[in-house]
Image: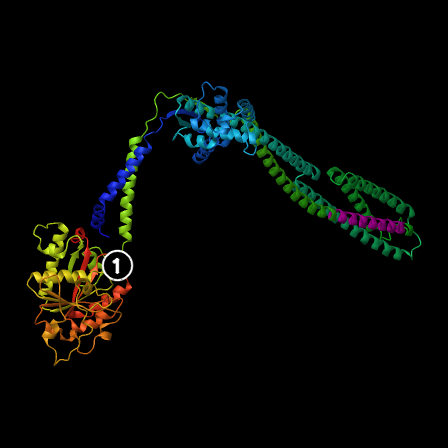
Amino acid sequence: MDLIYLFKSLLRRKWLIIISTLLAVMAAFSLTLNQEKLYKSVAQLATGFTMSDQVKLKDESFNVYEIDVKFNNAVEAIQSPRVLGMTSYNLMLHDLENPDKPFRIPSEEDRKTDIYRKLNRQKAIEILTKKYNEEKLLSSYNPEERKILELLNIYRYDLETLRYVLYVGRVQRTDFIDIQYRSINPELSAYIVNQVVTEFMRNYESSRNQQTVQNIETLKKLVDQKREELDAKIGNIKTMGTLDANVESSSTLEQISNFESRLADEKSILTSAQLASQQVTQRLSEMESTSTQNAAATSSANSELATLREKMNDASTEYQSKGGNDPELYKKYKNARNDYSAKLMAMASAAPSAANPGTTKADLQQKKSDLDLQVRSAQQNIAAYEQKIRQLNSSMGAAASRGANNLALQKEVELAQQEYESIKSRYDAAVNNKIAPMDNFHQILYGQPAVEPEPSKRIIIIAMAGMAVAVFCCILIIFLEYIDVSIKTPTQFLRVVELKLLGVVNRINLKKTPLEEIFTDPTLKKHDTATFRELLRKLRFEMEHSGKKIFLLTSAKPGEGKSTIIKALAYSLSLSHKKVLIIDTQFPHNTLTQEYEAKPVLESFNSSAQDFRIAAVQDLISPTTMPNVDIIGCEGGEYTPAEILKQGNLLEYLRALTHVYDYILLEGAALNDRADSKELMQYADTVITVVSARSGVNQTDRETISFLNNLNEKYSGAVLNFVEPENIDL
């Protein structure tokens, strides 16, 4: 939409905007005429949220978001029902206890109420004092307390009034909170802001102490619980043992190595003893044929061998009884074993010698017995060593499992230690906060009674009211113009309607100014009427130079102003010394016939081509009030020209009438609704459509526009009617 058009739309309605603005200014003036003078007092509270000089119990980073949340919490706490409730009770107690100098005096109307007249002042003071000391709010379910609540409303000490007037907010980019109050009494304003701070500090201290005690008790229980869990896990480690699994495994491997070495030695002894036993057995079989043996030598050797064996067994027993880990005892055992083995080998090597006269069969039998004993002893030692090695191997797996358990227990102990230390630190912080609070609220500015009232801002209010209404009216007008889909201007017509624009006719009130005066009165120089006259003259010029005689004026929809345009054109043509015949062919609405009281003869006329005479038509024609303009009327009805006009009707002889009349103007029904105009086109030389600037274009209109464009040369163009004078040049 064009900005110039919107601007002119506002200019057209300038008086509406001006009058609405003046009414708004007058209303604001009257409403602020008896405005009370208000006195403001300000108190300021330091929070300590952003101060860096306070005592720090722990290292903390500066968190802007957390600081904002703390300030919001503090503001909400100051405006809480509990703080404002205690403030209102204190104010009410002041006025009840000091009737000679109250902060507020109820109006005459309020003093006539039953609550005020039947008030038990002493009872009210007792209830308010009790509630104030206990920091409890009045209950509306209690009849006595409900009366006091109604009394607070009378004095305007109720919560809603205090919350509406009281302002609490942070001073931007500072550590302070402003508390402001305005009232008609400067002392009341100062008292309220100071009392609000007092009640907030009392409420905050009480809540903080209660919350701190609860937190300390809860944390103390958690500390004790975590301490018990830590002690239990430490006890589990003590029960399982704390020996390192790696050290224990290394010791076990060393023992296994020692026992495997001894096992190899015992197996060697077993092999030697078995070989010696076989040799002795062989010698015994050889000596069965020999009758003499050296008994003395054999007895001495056997005795010595028995002594060495006993010495070796004693060393082995002592070494095993001491745990099998003493290297000295093992060395002693090894030496005794070597001596015994050497003696045994010596005896075995001498056994087969027949030259040894000391070796007897008894000696060999004794020696065989000793060798068998040594074999059994070696076998027992081998079995014992193998069992010990198996035990040590199994103990290594147990040690590994025990080591894994020890690691798991150690992890559990470390986790329990961390949980305990975390809870303990929180508990210590809570105890420290009880002694030295982190928040340091204190009042740094006390409210004082104002000397002068606050500026009333009456002029600003009046100006803002007028400006708001003016802007609202402008926005409303622009919105209405925006949703208005009518054509309005010739420019809009050319952009929206794809038809040739033959002429433009502005809107004019013909009831106030008849056509005769518009064209004939030389003193008539009004802009609208003069524009209307000149625009019709332009349209007349287009018709005169078109070379056409018979014009059919129609429209897409009813009410576009066809009848008015026909009358104006006929009158304008008559002034140029042209004879004009108007034929009312709009059967649904024969407006022209009724207006000029013409004879309704169009439907009834019928003549053959041989009998047609111009003189016969003269009886059908009715004169109009306009010079050189005649009219032929119709009866009108719900029928079309093709249905009512017979063969040889008057319209078939219009060409003959052009010898008498310069121009013949036909009016047809709307194309969107009826087929009348389409049936009449065969009788006309050209077609002119009338389009109202107050109409929009819908789909049916577009179908009609397409039909008119298909008429080609038979279509002259459109006349844009009812255009606002200021929109003609847009």
User: Pointer 1: what residue?
Assistant: 696
For label 1, count other residues whose C-alpha is less than 10 Å away and answer few (under 14), some (14-19) or many (20+).
some
Query: Where does the magenta region start and end?
Result: 363-389
Residue nearer the viewer, 232 or 112: 112
Q: Quadrant of residue 125?
A: top right
Residue 380 to residue 672: above or below: above
Give the residue displayed 28% in from the left and 46% down from the top: 475
Question: What percent of the width, then of the height, locates residue 67?
Answer: 45, 33
Residue nearer the viewer, 286 or 440: 440
Question: What percent of the width, then of the height, locates residue 143?
Answer: 56, 31
Residue 30 to residue 665: above or below: above
Residue nearer the viewer, 604 or 180: 604
Residue nearer the viewer, 514 or 676: 514
Give the residue displayed 77% in from the left and 44% down from the top: 338
Give the residue displayed 80% in from the left and 49% down from the top: 378
Residue 432 visible to an observer of this rendering: no
Q: Is residue 582 left or right of residue 162?
A: left
In the image, what residue type sits under mark 1?
Answer: Gly
Residue 99 to residue 268: above or below: above
Q: Secondary structure at mark 1?
A: loop
